[in-house]
Amino acid sequence: MAASEPDKDIAPADLDTKRRFVRVTRERDDGFVEFDFAIGEPGLFVELILTRAAFAEFCAVNRVEDFPPDPAQPATPSDFDWRLKDATRTRFK
């Protein structure tokens, strides 16, 4: 099988890996902070949880920028609107 030649019309994504983004999603009573973290592209993020002190250090080390609440979250949630943390208490169809 011959390798296909890459499409010369497709430009690689312009991704600035020096930009780091954080969106706090919840500050818990037990001292933990739940947040989204992204590198280069705010739309691609991971969900993390750290103690408040560790979160402050994480933000300082990564020199993060805040990014606003997720605009993709609709005002009226549907069966498809969930986060990983919801998986432990949600029954999916």
Image (cartoon, helix red, strand yellow):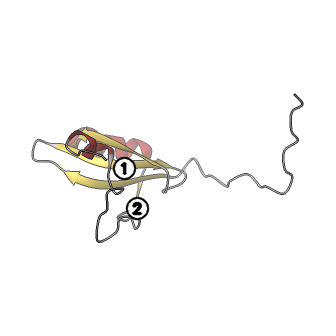
**Residue 61 horizontal side relative to residue 32, left or right:** right
Q: Amino acid at mark 1?
A: Asp
Picture quadrant of residue 77: bottom left
Picture quadrant of residue 56: top left
Picture quadrant of residue 71: bottom left
**What residue is rendered at 84% in x and 57% in y?**
9
| Residue 30: image location, x then y, percent | 10, 41
| Residue 35: image location, x then y, percent | 31, 49
Packing grade of label 2 (10 A; few <14, some 14-19, many >=20) is some
Q: Amino acid at mark 2?
A: Phe
The residue lying toward the viewer, choosing from 43 and 89, is: 89
Give the secondary structure at mark 2.
loop
**Of marks 2 and 1, the one in the foreground:** 1
Return the residue found at the far left.
29
Give the mark, 2 or 1, whose residue is nearer the N terminus.
1
**What residue is rendered at 32% in x and 57% in y?**
79
Residue at the disc numbered 2: 67
Residue at the disc numbered 1: 36
Return the residue found at the far top.
1
| Residue 90: image location, x then y, percent | 23, 46
The residue lying toward the viewer, choosing from 62 and 80, is: 80
Packing grade of label 1 (10 A; few <14, some 14-19, many >=20) is many
| Residue 17: image location, x then y, percent | 58, 47
**What residue is rendered at 87% in x and 52% in y?**
8
Q: Are marks 2 and 1 in contact (CB under 8 Å)?
A: yes
